[in-house]
Amino acid sequence: MFALPLHRREFLRQSGAWALAATGLPLASGGLLATPDKQTPETLVKVLYDSLAEKQRKDVCFAWNHLDKNRGLLRTRLENNWKITEPSIKSSFYTSDQQHLIREIFDGMIDPDWRERWDKQLVDDVGGFGNEQSIAIFGTPGTDQFEFVLASRHMTLRCDGNSAEHVAFGGPILYAHEGEDLYEQPNHPSNVFWHQALAANQLYDMFDGKQRAQALVIEGMPSEELVGFRGLDGKFDGIAVTQFSPDQKEHLQSVLQLLLEPFRKSDQEEVTRCVKVQGGLDACRLAFYKEGDLGSDGLWDNWRLEGPSFVWYFRGKPHVHVWVNVADTPDIELNSYQDSIGV
């Protein structure tokens, strides 16, 4: 658990009072608001926003639909190695209190049981939380339309308080881990996300010969950034979930739960809702790709679960990149690196 220094707790206590003063809640003794012990990331984004100086806001705060001349609609941008704004979290651009507050926002966006594993990923890939990590705030926190984006190498996460309509996670996200080496061994030692692929491969092992032939794509696989929705009439790789036996469907549900496990409960619930709206997992297909099979061991490093408005694309070569795009309608455009280079 990330420890808060005493001055940090006082900062949060006072900032929380400023942020909530307009709500009309009763004041506690000493003139400060009596705020809940547990604050949501969205509440803390408002506190952070209120603490930013004008110069800071100019560099990291944007209109809801801000268009970047090189990256398009910046709020929905997705890359596997980028900083959404120039200042790193652990830099003199932010005060120490603001840095601690950003960490608290991040902690609120993930499942508490996953903090140690997220921290390992961050140490391995960017030297620890805040190093070469950046944030941006879109819209005005405290209103019904704002979003906080955390972006760096191997991580793009969002929180929006459901400001972004129809989408889970506030929009497309990416999580990844290099583990022990840029080019990982077939068993991906120390990779904190590899167990997700092992669970998916256990499902492949449950298939009969005909199912395996349908599920396995022998030649080629989509470029990793291509996670835009294909809609109800889309052509998806792999085997239809409708062709699974009851026990295979049950295992797929457990795989989905593993995929959701690193994130906070409200995001898990939003994904579940979106999947239900698109027709459940029965509307999806599951594909495994022979290309990129590290060690040629038949343990498929690359696989993709996809439906009309659901894409979870696990890429295990040369190390793990996972691209996620989930909504309750396919009428959501994706803004990724591939779009800007015309791929």
Image (cartoon, grey):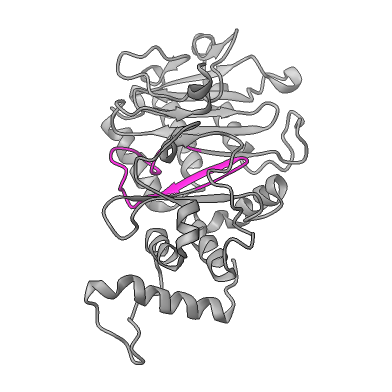
Horizontal side, residue 248 vs residue 141: left or right: right
State the image coordinates of residue 134 (x, y, percent, origin top left).
56, 50
State the image coordinates of residue 225 (x, y, percent, origin top left).
53, 25
Q: Choose between 166 and 203: the one closer to the eye.
A: 166
Q: Is residue 240 above or below residue 141?
A: above
For the N terminus, which image quadrant? bottom right
Question: Residue at point 42% right, 62% down?
Answer: 49
Horizontal side, residue 76 vs residue 86: left or right: left
Q: Is residue 104 above or below residue 137?
A: below
Q: Choose between 107 and 46: the one closer to the eye.
A: 46
Q: Is residue 22 above or below residue 177?
A: below
Question: Residue at point 71% right, 51% down?
Answer: 127
Magenta residues: mostly which secondary structure? Answer: loop
Q: Is residue 36 visible?
A: no
Q: Is residue 236 magenta?
A: no
Question: Residue at point 51% right, 41% down?
Answer: 258
The magenta span reads: 150-173
